[in-house]
Amino acid sequence: MALAISNIPILTGMAAESFVKNAEEAERSRGSIDFTRQHAEWSGFDIRNAARIAKLRAEGKRPF
């Protein structure tokens, strides 16, 4: 039994203009996420947990 071929929706008018405007805005702001807070929280993770990591490695386990 064959499936019916459906039409591909095409944006026109205001919907098309809005889509293009939003796409261009997203492209301009691409890569603008600020990860400084996350970096500050995770920096030094291996130093703070060095003993735990060394123990796991000594047991032959991979900590990451």
Image (cartoon, rainbow, N blue to C red):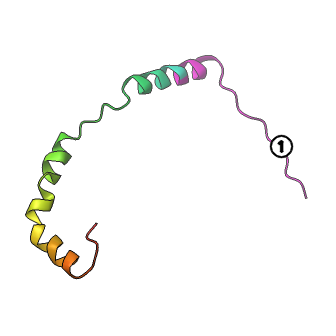
Could you tell me which secondary element the residue under label 1 belongs to? Answer: loop
Where's the N terminus, which quadrant?
Answer: bottom right
The residue beneath circle 1 is: 5
Query: Residue 20 at what x, y percent from top left?
Result: 53, 21
Residue ID at (56%, 17%): 17
Residue ID at (28%, 77%): 61
User: Residue 2 is drawn in which quadrant?
Assistant: bottom right
Q: Residues within 10 Å of mark 1 (few under 14, many from 20)?
A: few
On the rendered structure, is 19 left or right of 5? left
Residue ID at (13%, 47%): 40
Query: Residue 4 at what x, y percent from top left?
Result: 85, 47
On the rendered structure, is 20 left or right of 26? right
Front one among 59 and 34: 59
**Up-down relation of residue 60 to residue 17 (above or below):** below
Query: Residue 60 at what x, y percent from top left?
Result: 26, 80
Span of residues in magenta = 1-19
Q: Is residue 16 magenta?
A: yes
Residue type indicated by callout 1? Ile
